[in-house]
Image: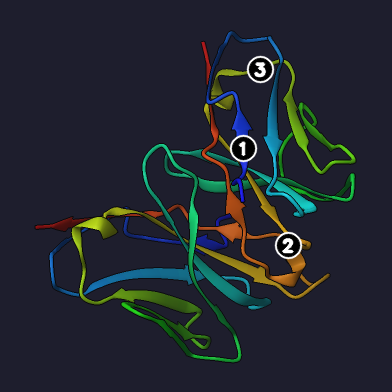
């Protein structure tokens, strides 16, 4: 069974631009969650989607948004990029919602650099 | 407010010895805890978990201990192997609809280096 696939692996953008990251979950998984990893901050929760609905959102500004499609694939969008948005963005999928304590399966991430 | 803390950013251990990674949390509503391991250029992978109704869970060389009164958990790796060299994240979640529930709160990670 294929794992979680994130594209692209690397991205370089300039301040003010916007970016869209893509995540394809493991087949059959309906929950997709997104995390931002920066040095010293660990993994910060961005949001979770289940059956095309956002279930929960972390403490990030409205510039960060996402969506999930009927095939469970998810996209994350960041508008008006800032230097501080440079990070590794990780997507994870699970069979059920996070609240059921199912283990997450992570993709390899998208490394975003904002210049 | 960092609700899950890993105060040691790095740890170096000799091969064959025990590695002990520590994690503290502040939210008493957390009732499920997990450890994930991350190699460079890869996403984190699930290692082991423990429910708050237990104080110990073992899986091969990995054991997680939970001390609820101290709001502390630790991961023991015995014996440590060079392939265990990675960043280890602890994570916590609460019951559905309670406190910080419905999402995992991760610590900042501890980089473990196992010397041959």
User: At 26% across and 54% down in the image, what residue appears?
Assistant: B85
The image position of residue B66, as x and y in percent, is 47, 84
Q: Secondary structure at mark 1?
A: strand
Tell us which disc is closer to us: 1 or 3. Answer: 1
Instruction: Specify which label sits upstream in the sequence, 2 or 3.
Output: 3
Check whether the beta carbons of the residues at disc 2 and disc 1 lie within 8 A of each other.
no
Q: Which residue is mark 1?
A: A5
Question: In which quadrant of the rendered image does the C terminus of chain B lie?
Answer: bottom left
Tell us which disc is closer to us: 2 or 3. Answer: 2
Label ID, residue A81: 3
- Specify the quadrant of the image occupied by residue A103: bottom right
Instruction: Specify which label sits upstream in the sequence, 1 or 3.
Output: 1
Up-down relation of residue B47 to residue B65 (above or below): above
User: At 69% across and 36% down in the image, what residue appears?
Assistant: A23
Q: Secondary structure at mark 3?
A: loop
| Chain to which mark 1 belongs | A
The image position of residue B98, as x and y in percent, is 79, 72
User: At 83% across and 70% down in the image, what residue appears?
Assistant: B97
Same subunit under labels 2 and 3? yes
Q: Is residue B37 left or right of residue A78?
A: left
The image position of residue B57, as x and y in percent, is 46, 85
The answer for how far apart the CA atoms under marks 2 and 1 are is 19 Å
Check whether the beta carbons of the residues at disc 1 and disc 3 lie within 8 A of each other.
no
The answer for how far apart the CA atoms under marks 1 and 3 are is 23 Å
Label ID, residue A98: 2
| Residue nearest the observer in this picture, A22 or A47 | A22
How many discs mark residues in the rendered view?
3
| Chain to which mark 2 belongs | A
Question: In which quadrant of the rendered image does the N terminus of chain B lie?
Answer: bottom right
Query: In the current view of this chain or complex, which residue is farthest to the front?
Result: A1
| Residue nearest the observer in this picture, A105 or A100 | A105
């Amino acid at each position: 069974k294929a794992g979680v696939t994130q594209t692209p692996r690397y991205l370089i953008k300039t301040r003010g631009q916007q970016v869209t990251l893509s995540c394809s979950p493991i087949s059959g998984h309906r929950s997709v969650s997104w995390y931002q990893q920066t040095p010293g901050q660990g993994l910060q929760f961005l949001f979770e989607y289940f059956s095309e609905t956002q279930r929960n959102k972390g403490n990030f500004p409205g510039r960060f948004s996402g969506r999930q499609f009927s095939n469970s694939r998810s996209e994350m969008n960041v508008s008006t990029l800032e230097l501080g948005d440079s990070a590794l963005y990780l997507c994870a999928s699970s069979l059920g919602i996070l609240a059921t304590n199912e283990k997450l399966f992570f993709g390899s991430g998208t490394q975003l650099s904002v210049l | 407010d960092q609700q899950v803390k890993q105060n040691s950013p790095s740890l170096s251990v000799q091969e064959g010895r025990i590695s002990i990674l520590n994690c503290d949390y502040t939210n008493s509503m957390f009732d499920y805890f997990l450890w994930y391991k991350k190699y460079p250029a890869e996403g984190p992978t699930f290692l082991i978990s423990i429910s708050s109704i237990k104080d110990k869970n073992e899986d091969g060389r990995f054991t997680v201990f939970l001390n609820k009164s101290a709001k502390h958990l630790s991961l023991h790796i015995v014996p440590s192997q060079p392939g265990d060299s990675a960043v280890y994240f602890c994570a916590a979640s609460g019951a559905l609809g309670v406190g910080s529930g419905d999402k995992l709160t991760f610590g900042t990670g501890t980089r473990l280096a196992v010397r041959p």
